[in-house]
Image (cartoon, helix red, strand yellow):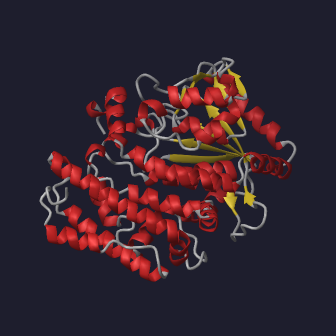
Amino acid sequence: MLEAAGLSEHDVTAWRSATPTTLGSFPAAARASCDFLTRGEELLGRLPARGERSDTEQAAASELVAFLNGARADFMRAYASDVYGALTDDMRLSLRVEDLVYTAADLYPWLVPTRAAMQEERSRKLADKEGIEIAQGVFLSFVLASPAAGSHLVWSMLRPTDAALERLDEFRSTGVADLGPAYVERRGRAAYLELRNPRHLNAEDGNTLPDTEAAVDLVLLDPDVDVGVFRGGVVDHPRYAGGRIFGAGINLTLLYTGQIDFLFYITRDMGYVNKLYRGLSSDEHRPEEPEQTTEKLWVAAVETYAIGGACQLLHTMDHVIATRGCRLYLPARKEGIIPGASNMRLARSVGDRLARQAILSGLEFEAGTPRGDLLCDEVVDSPAGMDAAVETRVEALTSSGLVNAAANRRAMRVGVEPLDVFRQYMATYCREQAHCHLSPALVRNLEQHWNAHQRRV
């Protein structure tokens, strides 16, 4: 098949003869695997770009990619812990997901794509991508499947970001942090965090993500804050002008045009979303001890709608206040991706059957109805009543002190979702979401249900 696509018999034979095994020492296996991957990627690079390939060339490329990803999986299956140890100095270093994969790319050629390769891939529309991010999914899946390496990575992703630490003194002094896409203001013992992306109805993308995480960190780091309030900012869309929207989920236009990376999903759910749920990890990684986290209670003030990723946030909140008629739903079926950790968390609120209907068949929830109230703790009749409802709830949650509240919160979480359960879920999520993200079905769904090809960036 490769020769029929124009690749030379000599080069194909040389590549096949370099097929590695997982026998022997880790350094030898690493060298052999990287040599095989490098040779294979060179062959792949001799084929035309995906959008310019003939059927024969595309079949050859698909076969070649499958072999390469199989070799990556074989190597990581045998040596994931060794790789992670080499990248983190035997877990003395704390590397975030986005740093881990590119450090791996530098140390182990073509085990995962380099920054330069990703920059080129990012220039392509989703339909035209070469699919190199699947290697990132394979890599992270095996790291997270390793109990030792995976728990260390989860811990690393729960550390406060440098961006938050740099702003902490200023925030503590002024009580305000304007990060652009995210805005935080301390009022009394509560900190109000607004997601602000008004042009895109408070949708999330690669630009909003780091600032949202830094904002969550600031709330968790400030000792003068007991409760965080998460809210969507005011939007300027003619249909909703002057109103607030909790969130429109992932920016589907940027997804369609190829400007959202696969790593967006992983850094989001292992980063700020998990921090909302678990808090910040302790200074040292102590997997043999009970969880030690810096966490706060969170209130969600939900107006207009919470779509996709915004709806996923509700599963992490301690109290959800929504306006009557607010739509709460996960359009995972229409989009063709996995809705974060909702597959694990949604059923706790609504039960298994409704969770399956929501994720697999597009069932929607509406605040103020019996079904919708399974996702809400409180419903206000109009947006005008939201501020008072939030203030009342903050007062109620802080009246008994944070120590008692955080202790109960932590104990409840450990009972239903121990850190190891989250780690194992994310191992599966990384692998499956990579394939969903790069599936032709996702492109087709975006065109059919979102008219993505007609929208402006």
Q: Quadrant of the C terminus?
A: top left
Image quadrant where residue 49 sits: bottom left
Q: Is residue 135 found left or right of 292 in the rendered image? A: left
Which percent across, then down, holds residue 417? Answer: 71, 48
Q: Quadrant of the N terminus?
A: bottom left
Number of numbered tags placed on the structure image: 0
Q: Is residue 230 found left or right of 70 in the rendered image? A: right
Which percent across, then down, holds residue 68? Answer: 34, 62
Residue 118 position (above or below residue 334): below
Q: Say whether residue 400 is visible.
A: yes
Give the residue drawn at x 65%, y 23%: 372
Give the residue drawn at x 31%, y 54%: 122
Q: Is residue 268 found left or right of 295 in the rendered image? A: left
Q: Say whether residue 175 is visible.
A: no
Which percent across, then down, holds residue 382? Answer: 63, 20
Closer-to-camera residue (128/167): 128
Residue 59 position (above or below residue 284): above
Closer-to-camera residue (49/401): 49
Image quadrant where residue 90 sits: bottom right
Give the residue drawn at x 62%, y 56%: 423
Which percent across, then down, holds residue 223? Answer: 74, 57
